[in-house]
């Protein structure tokens, strides 16, 4: 039953927009527009006593006046009206209410918060609430988009396998926007704000059961119920990677988090210990969290932590080696027969060790030969491929060749490629073919480390 | 005199391209093309006994046959011909020779290396040599461009104030290409390869004296003469920031560096100590080195390490606070009157502490008011401004408003702004106006830390 209610946030039969408005730049207009013009196939019901129609849709004076089934409502009215409106949702039988409106616990408003809590209590077990003070939900599978920011300001990513929850709306939206620009894709995005009812644990549990979500990512400032979160996160992390970014790990950061979402951020050590025990992948920056999510989405499970580097540029080979050792991974030692095979097929000046430096005149055939040899060597658990496209011997065919060689890979392989416009284009072509690429050797290695930590153990 | 010789690499009267060729995709063709079609205003003399003309230019059988003054030569012939050709350069009176050709110390080729050393010795004090096994030189001021990679593969950055030297050619070229795409600009780029004559210390010294270079950046694997480098780097760092990225800081990385450029990378601890003593700014990644270079180029000297954060999104405020404290910087405590002023001009729900959270409905006037108040507060040494452009209240005018407010700044201010296409456009507009921007709060704070380390001390 509880899960059934949660489902109504993401796959509702009918959505009411309470506070819908035709007024330019209003939140009520942005939400109505996003739902009407997006991919949500169900019915959208604007609710606002001051209007008969909003953006061509019939507008109702109250959610109770809608003569159809309404599973979900999104609430964007001034805070003082929220408790009443939520009560009406309860009477109507709405099962999933997302409250965008701010002006509750986050600004220390106790009276309104108490009223809202009382109303929500009346419908406990029959209605779930996300928010208040949140950005809303985006589900690229079902088409639900109740984010209150217009598409012109906040790009919507395409469909992906990573779902992302964020306590912070502004941070969540910036990341979503960035994700859209990068072309990475997302499955579900939920900004859950003050978490008066649905909290991080509920969402992680829901996404753990959601078959279209392969990787769960969370930005957390505080956790409402530590025990519950730990129990659920551990269970989910046993099935699929859970990546967490924790804000407020310093005393000052925790203070800032408290005045931001009213959450008690708590000691960094406690979180570190809990994350490790639950096998939650910890990311320090948002960028690294997305890096990790990409490799979890594309790469097979590694058997160990021995990394082989293949490069056409010595300098990056050196930096990659430093990064591997500094991250606690190991340099693979290829077998004698692998070494002999690669040496036989490379010019004399190539260095066949770790890194394997195929040197600046390497072409796609030399790369393909070396990659195949290394993939077949059981002394190698993961591969870092450094492709510098500046050299004229690396022609366009190299992307297809690398893709062909890696298509059926049984080991994680990531590609590092730095450069400008030409390189960037080749790198994006690899990304489109499901190969995770990086512009920095440190970022590439950090992602391999995340794979090893999750699958092999620290 | 020595400096006069060094000048001939960058502002030569006449350049000979030894090994020039009309053959498509040849190195000799790429160099001739880049020189002829670039901004170098002097004469270019192709040299190759097999051709009469190369790309429409008269081609000479030997550098000695050129009947004009030739200050510089770039050598791109097979290794075995290099000693002879360099000897001819000496006879002709060429003062600056850049040897692109590989096949010497880096592959353990002792005989040829010895021959080359002997020839170079004959002209000691009359000729300087960069290379062999290098990518060459790009000088955006004089127009000298002897890089052997075509512009279609390797973008050329515009003119800037940062000069960059790299032992590794592939790494250097990838970075140059990336820099061109980012639109950051460069002053001089030198890939110096095996450093048989001109080494990192000579180049740092030259760039230290070069008035158009404001920031010196170096990628180092090993250092040929530690004492000399330390003495010179310390002297230069007293005048302008010297940023160093050190490859081969782990045992494995040092081994890789040895087989790459034959350099002895040496213990990380030694380098760390030397860098600190010489006040060299240490960067771990190339990306952070360029971040540092940008803020050194745009920001005034900070007086202390107290950072004030101003944000319109609480989550990023939390992460920025964490980053400030984790980097050993301090959170500024604004004066009571500053706090009162900002509170008077902000809505009640704004949080005026550190971070100052102007909240998601902040417009440009609220930002401008808060920035001015903080800039005027002597309790604040540096400012981190977080601008999230997703919110509709931040209209286009904000870029102009921020620029106007920061134009005469006496304190370092950096901007952090994450997001997608729209944000990226605004961010780039700020960059063009000389304001350093970052997409991650961690990167922004790391750069403030570099400023503090260099100007205030660790």
Image (cartoon, coloured by chain):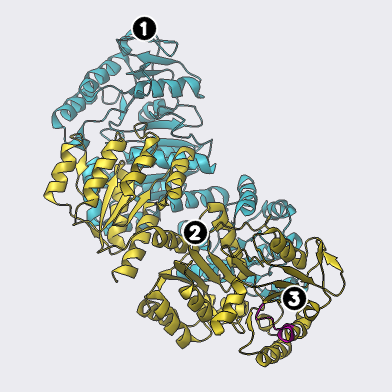
Chain colours: A cyan, B yellow
Pick whichever, B315 or A418, lies toward us: A418
State the extent of the magenta-drawn residues as a range: B89-98
Q: Splitting the image into 4 quarters, where does residue B357 fall?
A: top left
- Residue depicted at 57% across the width and 82% down the height: B263
Residue B354, horizontal then vertical, whole percent: 22, 50
Q: Which of marks 3 and 2 is in front?
A: 3
C-alpha separation, residue under disc 3 versus residue under disc 2: 51 Å
Pick whichever, B452 or B321, lies toward us: B452
Residue at the farthest left position: B336
Q: Name the residue under label 2.
A: A443
Secondary structure found at label 1: loop
Q: Name the residue under label 3.
A: B68
Number of marks present in the image shown: 3
C-alpha separation, residue under disc 3 versus residue under disc 1: 87 Å
Residue A339, horizontal then vertical, whole percent: 70, 74
Secondary structure found at label 2: helix
Return the chain for callout 2: A
Return the chain for callout 3: B
Residue at the farthest front position: B68
Q: Quadrant of the N terminus of chain A?
A: top left
Q: Splitting the image into 4 quarters, where does residue A310 fall?
A: bottom right
C-alpha separation, residue under disc 1 versus residue under disc 2: 54 Å
Q: Mark 1 points at which residue?
A: A52
> Could you tell whether B198 is left or right of B386 in the image?
right
> Could you tell whether B247 is left or right of A247 in the image?
right
Whether marks 1 and 2 lie on the same chain: yes
> Could you tell whether A409 is left or right of A142 in the image?
right
Whether marks 3 and 2 lie on the same chain: no
Whether marks 3 and 1 lie on the same chain: no
């Amino acid at each position: 039953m509880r899960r059934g209610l949660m489902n109504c946030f993401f796959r509702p039969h009918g959505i009411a927009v309470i506070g819908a408005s035709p007024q330019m730049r209003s939140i009520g207009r942005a939400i109505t527009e996003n739902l009407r013009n997006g991919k949500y196939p169900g019915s959208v019901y604007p609710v606002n006593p001051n209007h008969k129609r909003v953006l061509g849709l019939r507008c109702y004076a109250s959610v109770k006046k809608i003569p159809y089934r309404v599973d979900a409502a999104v609430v964007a009215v001034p805070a003082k009206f929220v408790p009443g409106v939520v009560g009406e949702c309860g009477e109507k039988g709405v099962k999933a209410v997302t409250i965008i409106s701010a002006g509750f616990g986050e600004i220390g408003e106790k009276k309104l918060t108490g009223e809202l809590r009382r109303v929500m209590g009346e419908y406990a077990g029959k209605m779930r609430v996300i928010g208040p003070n949140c950005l809303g939900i985006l589900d690229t599978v079902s088409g639900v988009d109740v984010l209150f920011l217009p598409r012109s300001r906040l790009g919507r990513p395409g469909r992906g396998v990573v779902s992302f929850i964020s306590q912070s709306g502004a941070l969540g939206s910036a990341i979503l926007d960035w994700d859209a620009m990068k072309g990475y894709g997302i499955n579900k995005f939920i900004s859950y704000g003050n978490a008066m009812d649905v909290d991080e644990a509920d969402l992680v549990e829901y996404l753990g059961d959601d078959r279209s979500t392969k990787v769960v990512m969370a930005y957390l400032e505080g956790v409402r119920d530590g025990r519950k979160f730990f129990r659920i996160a551990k269970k989910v992390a046993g099935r699929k990677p859970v990546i967490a970014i924790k804000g407020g790990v310093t005393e000052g950061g925790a203070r800032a988090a408290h005045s931001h979402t009213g959450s008690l951020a708590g000691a960094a050590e406690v979180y570190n210990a809990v994350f490790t025990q639950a096998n939650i992948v910890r990311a320090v920056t948002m960028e690294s969290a997305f890096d990790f999510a990409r490799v979890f989405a594309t790469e097979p499970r590694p058997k160990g932590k021995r990394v082989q580097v293949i490069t056409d540029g010595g300098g990056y080979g050196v930096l990659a080696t430093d990064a591997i050792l500094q991250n606690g991974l190991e340099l693979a030692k290829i077998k004698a027969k692998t070494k002999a095979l690669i040496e036989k097929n490379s010019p004399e000046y190539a260095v066949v060790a770790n890194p394997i430096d195929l040197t600046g005149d390497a072409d796609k055939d030399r790369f393909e030969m070396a990659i195949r040899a290394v993939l077949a060597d059981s002394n190698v658990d993961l591969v870092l491929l450094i492709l510098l496209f500046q050299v004229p011997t690396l022609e366009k065919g190299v992307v297809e060749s690398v893709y062909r060689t890696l298509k059926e890979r049984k080991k994680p392989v990531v590609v590092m490629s730095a450069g400008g416009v030409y390189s960037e284009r080749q790198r994006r072509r690899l990304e489109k073919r499901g190969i995770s690429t990086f512009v920095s050797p440190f970022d590439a290695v950090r992602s391999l480390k995340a794979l090893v930590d999750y699958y092999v153990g620290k």
